[in-house]
Amino acid sequence: MFSVKPLKPTFKSYLPPVQTDVKKNIPLPIKKLEAKLLPGEIVVNEVNFVRKCISAESSQDDLWGKLICTNFKVSFISHDALPKQRSQVSHLLLGEHDIPLTCLEQVVTVNDTKGKKKVLSSNQKLKFNPTELILYCKDFRIIRFCFDEAGPESAKKVCLAIAHYSHPADPQLLFGFEYRGRQYHGSSGEQSNGTTLGRGFQTPLFDRPSEWDREIKRTGAAEWRVCSINEGYAISPSLPEYFVVPVSLADQDLKQYSDSFTDKRIPMWCWNHPNGSALVRMASITDQLQQRKIDQRICTGITKSHPQRSDVLRSDLDKALPNIQEIQSAFVKVRQICVIDPFEESEEKWLSSIESSQWLEYVRVFLKHSAEIVYLLEGKNASVILQEEGDRDLNCVVSSLVQLMLDPHYRSLIGFQSLVQKEWVMAGHRFLDRCNHLKKNDKEESPLFMLFLDCVWQMMNQYPAAFEFTETYLTVLSDSMWIPVFSTFLFNCPQQHAEHLMDFTKSKRIPLGEEKVLHFPPVWDWSQQFSLKDQTLFNNPMYVGKGASCVQNGTVKTFRRTKHKTYSSTLRGVPSALRNGLKDGHDTLTRRNSLLAQLRPDFSQMREVVESPSERFFRDWFSRPADQKGLLIPQLLPSHVTLWRLYFLRWVPEACILKGGPVTAYQKLSQLVDEIEMLQSKLRQYKGPTPASTPISSPSGPPSDQRRMYFQARTPDETPATPEYLSSSFPFTPVGNLCRRNVHGTPISKFLNGAKIWLSTETLANETL
Amino acid sequence: MEKSGSIDSLGSKRSSSRQPSVDSLSSASTSRSDRSAQAKPPSAMSSDSVATSTELSPELRVRKPACHVLRDSSKEEPQLLPNEIVQDMAKDVTYICPFIGPLRGTLTVTNYRLFFNCIDRDPAFVLDLPLGVVSRVEKIGGASSRGDVSYGLVCKDMRNLRFAHKQMDDTLRKSIFEVLMKFAFPVSNGLQIFSFEYGQVFPENGWKVYDALTEYKRQGIPNESWRITKVNDHYELCDTYPSTLVVPVNIPDEELKRVAAFRAKGRIPVLSWIHPESQATVTRCSQPMVGVNGKRSKEDEKYLQAIMDANAQSHKLFIFDARPSVNAAANKMKGGGYESEDAYQNAELVFLDIHNIHVMRESLRKLKDVVYPNIEESHWLSNLESTHWLEHIKLILAGALRIADKVESGKTSVVVHCSDGWDRTAQLTSLAMLMLDGYYRTIRGFEVLLEKEWLSFGHRFQLRIGHGDKNHTDADRSPVFIQFIDCVWQMTRQFPAAFEFNEYFLVTILDHLYSCLFGTFLCNSEQQRVKEEIPKKTVSLWSYINSQLEEFTNPLYVNYSNHVLFPVVSLRHLELWVGYYIRWNPRMRPQEPVHQRYKELLAKRAELQKRVEELQREVTNRSASSSSERAGSPTRSITPVQTFV
């Protein structure tokens, strides 16, 4: 059934005898341990009596069970439950110990007695019998299995199978194809329609003209139109079939210009500011001779689409920002520091190591550059072209950040998803290459989407009421990149998406029924992964934007896109004292070491230091109260860009704050909001269904599974049980998910780790718990 | 706001509390914000803005800018506190703001504050700080070509200010800065600290917050193992200890004196805290006077044995010496040292490696260089690392964590000391108690903790801060207490719902550590405070704070009982307290207020509850009159599902 890839029959044929041999020797209760399989998923190889390491300190909590490699995941099945807290969220596609093959970064086999270690890749041989398997995952987990009681041959085979199947030779070997195709078999197309449509499904995918049209109308981009010259990917293979261009540029001209652009990517509209300025992205012009002319025509076109015929400004992102290799290397370093380096040893130089990774600096630089663009659009009332050689990497990050800062719509859940859809998926971000799903070309791998999510988190951290979703949502979204059953992260561009689906449908003779194409859903239908209850973890109780049910004074204020006028008018009205001679100490003055160093005989020199207009704009904005429903500019001081702890440290047991962390505040807020929503629904009952209110509410109040908050208020009849203590990793758990090798156990209790390295005089052995 | 009366009476006070604040842009933003009621209080800058913005209820926020408006109307002069007198005023003084450049305006010096007002600008620029924060005043450079003289003010609260004004034509007239110097350093100039003149009356008397007997009673003391002794009633046993001490029952007062002879400055081991269940105790003292010859004291050994015996759960005693072992050993040369495990049976000695006051002072000085006036864009983290500030914070918290863990998990009693037992020891015992006992995490409990572990046990505030003393190079100055507050803040970050107080509370304490407005942090010991009649002659900071608790309350607070906090003491979680150290930077906007949003939601809930109740009443009335059938469902559980505040 898994005919795409030639199976290695040898694996299976050897398995049963080895297993039975082992069973005789080990006095363990023999129960049937069956892998839970998805449609289209098959077991490739398995080995019994495997020990999964749970904590680095001792083996007493370790779990015994069966290690299974399927064409989708590495699965570990155990009868024992985890000793400590379990993950709070259950995943519908993956079990507690499962790792999708796509999520594997490195497969390492170890033989302790021989002192050997080998990193396995596809089609390799292994000259020793592994005693241990360490799986380094893309989501930062490090999972360790020991084979001390398992059959050595079958253990080896499972390791080889895992290595092999995690390096698919072709995108169509990614499990999603088999999985989606399988849904048409048997029930002949019925299932594909029957999938429950969660609310995420309202996300516009921007694969049809009407969705672009709606976006044009929503942003009031009157002088822009949907262009369909790329239908059937006739012009550019990497652009979407439909996109938006200035009204004044005719299809014929665009076709002609396209030849001069990298990848034939003609400029594509991203967004319109209410003041009429537009954000446009484009690739560089390769044809040097034509460059000037085309540049001019494009600019004229964009200018004509501006109500004030404002100038078009251009930002060359390749010059301003780090490139994809630099970003990748920063990410590798920060990952090394956060999860691979031993906790204690990395503690002493923690700050400078984080700095030297450059990750936070890159996050800051991207935010800063995006804020500069915001200034041009908002403060200078100018249209901006984001230019990048390929228009498929840096442009994705910056254009989406700019829109996130300017347009509160994108800070709603649906809005955010549509933004990712528009600026990443449809714009042809090379997810397949950047994620390196095929593990073919490490040079192409770069965590740009992760960088974007970190930038979003920084803004969320600074403006916690401005986003409808939570950091849990962002984390789960990042994890979804490594589950290969969503079309969102599997392709380099829509054209590749379409081609592969067509190809797969044909070659596998998928009975599509009435559908024209195989339905390969995006990640946005969250019901594929989580129950409705678990999805409520995405809801930010503090959210003040549209759709938040509790805005102050009970009036739901919707964002009015005229808001900018107040800002720009006040900017114009800035007193002259502020306009002139404002010096920006921040960038232009070096730090003083002492008061004496500040000495300047003539202090009026200070006046000569001039603050840049954008800095003045930012300072002016910062000096007034932030409207979470309007323009948001992140704070760009290095002291305000911090490590995203939930994402980077969630698996690190030593960094887990028991009974603490931001989640404790989230819990309280959620309960309060839940209570408010209960009261609101009660009010609606009293008032009866009015034309204004939606008559959905059932007479007895919303059932608990329809409540928006994960943490619900207690009713008076419920006994106030012992408070539910959460840890800072919530809803994730570090238990068993980060087993660094060769960490020597210490008898000190876990939370004393901070103190441990400072022990100078006493021996560790003295320390008893 | 129900307390409007008291707030009114606090009017002047309130503005003063916000004084160490308004720098440059804050005034701008404040005056701007007062135009819209929705507005958030000033962004960066001031102590108030930092946390206030998060904490102030809407009513207060509207009210607060009012004082700015008032100031605007009077333009030139600050709103004076009771008994505050203008000493000098000079026009055409230039304040060289490191953020927005030179500003020309009027400078006023009173016996309490420096007030600079620049009215050329709209909105007016106001700088208003208590003279108590001034560490030194320097005349910089001579006359320049234009005949300007320049003065630099180095402040204790992480900023430097620079002023310039024209050389006086009238050479007989003193520069305003000479006047300023006189009043900034009253102690050095034979003047009285302003606290003694400030006579504001508050609804609550903060001097009554702490009563040693009440606090020990709360802990269940006296009990069968511990007694309260009056041996130090007249501070004869130890002049830096409080009059009320708790000691093991079976050690008579006579023996205490012999123990005192063996402990530095007579600071014998006394009880700070006792575990309500296990009876494991936290005791504190100074180093033993072991000296180079390894002197022993039978009484001291017996005394520590008695402390151990008082706890039936464990047959061990842990002695935590806060110092690095090298320092502890070096102290033998000066007659001090540490307990040898040979002499003290069943005791185990642990060094916590916390450095001395000089190292801490230097670390904070470096930190100031890194954060003020501007933060370098590159190398921020390595610059921060090179100050070692967070490393010191980590060491202190780690030490406290080990103490708390030993007491809670190990059910073992601990003795904590450093050299004299008034700096590092105070940090450690108070932090451990904060982890162990939820009472100290309430506002009043925290005040008690400070009064007890810091003030009554003789942390030398006068020497460490140097109130009104011009001798800024005094080696006794050190930010030990600031470090402690920083550690507390770190804990509030890790446990956002475990503390009744908010960030603004902590910032306010630090602001008034320097302001010399309240008597709380004056003097070095209880004995001195009694002698100077501080409670009689000055106002307590707690009077001010407890009269408007709302402002200092963390709305997310949940009072879990028996909730012991074990913070993660790792640089992965410790962070620089930007809301305090970087608050003068106008680029710094406080984190968007979770607390404020929570309060809005609380108000929203109250409003909804009211409406539901009204409707309910209506329905019941209607159904009563018409004996309707539909009374059933809506009446069910209208009462609040859960009550928070």
Image (spheres, rainbow, N blue to C red):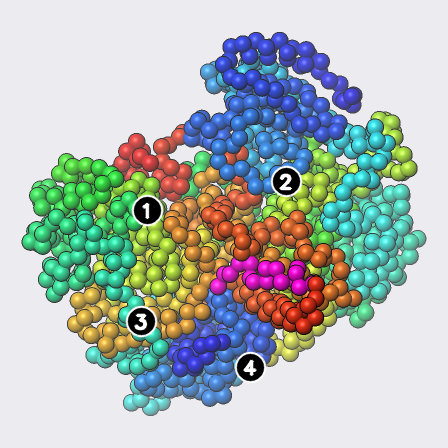
Q: Position of residue A686 (x, y in %)?
A: 69, 65
Label 1 sits on what residue type?
Ala
Majority secondary structure of magenta residues: loop
The residue tagged 2 is A479
Same chain for the residues under marks 1 and 3 in the image:
yes
Q: Position of residue A706 (x, y in %)?
A: 68, 51
Could you tell me which secondary element the residue under label 4 belongs to?
Answer: loop
Mark in the foreground, 1 or 4: 1
Could you tell me which secondary element the residue under label 2 belongs to?
Answer: helix
The residue tagged 1 is B404
Mark in the foreground, 2 or 3: 3
Q: Residue at x 22, y 60 (%)?
A: B457
Q: Residues within 10 Å of mark 4 (few under 14, many from 20)?
A: some
Give me the chain letter of mark 2.
Answer: A
The residue tagged 4 is B122
Q: Which residues are magenta?
A: B630-645
Could you tell me which secondary element the residue under label 3 belongs to?
Answer: helix
Of labels 1 and 3, earlier in sequence is: 3
Q: CA distance from mark 1 to mark 4?
A: 54 Å
The residue tagged 3 is B206
Same chain for the residues under marks 4 and 3 in the image:
yes
Residue lying farthest right? Answer: A252
